[in-house]
Image: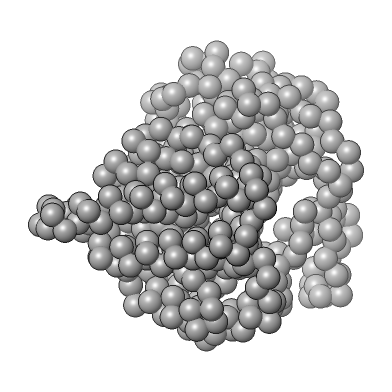
Amino acid sequence: MNEKTRDVVISAPGKAILHGEHAVVHGKVALAVSLNLRTFLRLQTSSSGKVCINLPNIHTFLSWDLTLLQPLLPENRGNDGNVQELDPSLMKKLREFTGIAEGSTDTQSMAVFAFLYLYLSVFAKSPVLPSMTVAVWSELPTGAGLGSSAAFCVCVAAALLSTQGTISSPQILENSTARWSVEELELVNQLAFQGEKIIHGNPSGVDNAVSTWGGILRYHAGKMTPLERVPVLRILLTNTKVPRSTKTLVAGVKDKINKFPTILIPVLESVDAVSCKCEEILADMATCSATAEHYSMLEELIDINQHHLNVMGVGHPSLDVLCRATLARGLHSKLTGAGGGGCGITLLRPETDCCVIHSTIQDLKAFSYECWETSIGAPGVQLHSSAFIRRPYPEQLPKSFCLYSMDLLEFYVIYWTHLKHLLPVYSRPVLF
């Protein structure tokens, strides 16, 4: 382990699908984009003889003595976590140690299981397991199809690999950020993918790739290609909070294709064309100055794709409400992800007035939707200076919170977890 690495602060973005939902399952192009709603991690090494993990968003606070973790180390101790397949022996030991059954989908259990697996894999070659405290908190809602688990795994992977010394610890100035080399980011991505396998079983790898690399990824027939230059686009992200089953929705689309192939196959071809045209427009916007015409075409593509998704049968009345409410304000929306409820994205032009955005959010809030004004095309996983997080106003804290000996990041964890309801829905703390 690199002894100089004592305090690591990392963030990674969530993800959304811009175009190509469901069609990608049938061999068509999809565009996956990074969301500038981020997950944050702080890792501090110590001499406590314990490993502690604090996950305030999901109310999980656990610690383990190193003497109990040492016997769990994998028998093959030479991979630094850089393997393609999960270690069945380590998986079995961890199930017995944690009491988490195979097939569990509980959010807290899966996060803890993934963390312990990655920790033991990365430090398998270390003569002594390191003591540490890891705190992870997020702006992303869980279970909304926005890549929250991937952002968690990417943060954990980058922090552990950096602490172990497998990847570098770039020097950063106060109030600054740094990234790793392409080769190091690939190691982060591979290790994060292991965590995603633990949590989801058989993931595509898109979510962790977007969270690692950031920007926009083109996904086609199992191949992921980052777009070289992408514009950052403002969006309104809305969670209808309507639960849905991705498996059921995917199966429904397949059944409809089998039932009406001459009708649905052209729809899939059209969605593919929408993705490719959008990719072309985004490349042009990144190369040249973005124009009103660019945004008009993006809006038209959003409308076309949303209609196609409704034809596939993955729309929902809650998403229809979103589209109508935003269109009444001159904005264009579509579902993102599996559909059937879940989340939708609304494109915001650069000149969109803040009053329009505020009014739109209030309209949607009346339906009990959650909204975030954010952007897509955000940077991937980053290393931060610990001084880079701003202290919130202490007078907003309840008197029951003691601030003595609490550093900035611990303060922020408590603030964001317990007090975000005090903020207007259209704003959130500006961290970076």
Image coordinates for residue 409, horizontal then vertical, percent: 79, 53
- The answer to whether residue 129 is above or below residue 354 is above
x%, y% of residue 72? 52, 26
Q: Is residue 90 left or right of residue 65?
A: left
User: In this orientation, which residue lies closer to the viewer: 143 or 337?
Assistant: 337
Res 428 seen here = yes
Whole-percent x, y for residue 386 in the image: 83, 45
Q: Residue at x 38, y 76 (%)?
A: 320
Tag count in the figure? Answer: 0
The quadrant in which residue 129 appears is top right
Residue 206 versus residue 29: which sits nearer the camera? Answer: 29
Colour scheme of the picture: one colour
Task: Compare residues 174 and 416 and report the one nearer the observer.
Answer: 174
| Residue 344 x, y percent position in the rendering | 46, 66
Is 283 above or below relative to 50?
below
- Please state if 169 lies on the left or on the right of 292 as rendered: right
State left or right for residue 16 relative to residue 60: left
Toward which corner of the image does residue 124 lie, by quadrant? Answer: top right
Whether residue 37 is visible, yes or no, is no
Left or right: 215 as drawn, with respect to 220: right
The residue lying at 34 percent from left, 49 percent from top is 272
